[in-house]
Image (tube, grey):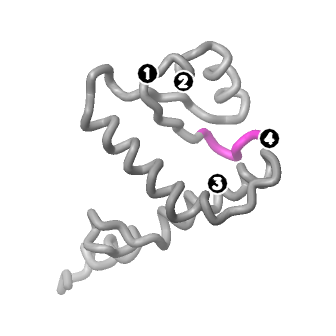
Amino acid sequence: MKAESEIEWLSDNGSCYIADETLTFSREIGLKPVTTPVRSPQSNGMTESFVKTKKRDYVSWMPKPYARPALQNLAIVFDHYNESHPHSALKYRSPPEFRQRANSPTQA
């Protein structure tokens, strides 16, 4: 199964993530492997927080009988996260709500 468009897959530089087999497989399914800078705790912390949120709010509740539905569910997760999920950095608004208020003349 291949994603409709290229999706960046961010990971640290752990040996399992930079192994040739992993990189080849990720490209075959439409992912673009990207690694955090070496010795960058801030980047690692952002990545770990992102993954923790996905696991807590989505993956733990989803059926995962095998690869195809799991990948399809991940597409749904990212759509929901980017369109509906409230983000603390956006004052607990979804990205569209935040953009709408930012572009509003009253900026509530």
Viewer-nearest residue: 61 or 77: 61
Residue drawn at x 56%, y 31% as measured from the top left: 32
Numbered badge on residue 1: 4
Distance between the Cα atoms at labels 1 and 3? 23 Å
Instruction: Classify 85 as above or below 50.
Output: below
Residue 63 figure quarter: bottom right
Q: Earlier in the sequence, mark 4 or mark 2?
A: 4
| Dominant secondary-structure state across the stretch colored magenta | loop
What crowding class fits label 3: few (fewer than 14 Cα within 10 Å), some (14-19), or many (20 or more)? some
Identify residue type, mark 2.
Tyr
Q: Is residue 68 left or right of residue 32?
A: right
Distance between the Cα atoms at labels 4 and 1? 25 Å
Q: Which quarter of the rendered picture does the N terminus lie within?
A: top right
Q: Give the residues drawn in magenta, as a range.
A: 1-6
Distance between the Cα atoms at labels 1 and 2? 6 Å
Q: Which quarter of the rendered picture does the C terminus lie within?
A: bottom left
Q: Is residue 64 left or right of residue 41?
A: right
Identify residue type, mark 4.
Met
Q: State the residue position of label 2.
A: 17
Identify residue type, mark 1.
Asn
Viewer-nearest residue: 7 or 81: 81
Outermost residue to the top? 20
Quick check: marks 4 and 3 in contact, CB under 8 Å? no
Viewer-nearest residue: 55 or 68: 55
Distance between the Cα atoms at labels 2 and 3? 19 Å
Q: Earlier in the sequence, mark 2 or mark 3?
A: 2
Numbered badge on residue 13: 1
Residue drawn at x 38%, y 49% as measured from the top left: 49
Identify residue type, mark 3.
Leu
User: Which element is circle 3 on?
Assistant: helix
User: Which element is circle 2 on?
Assistant: helix
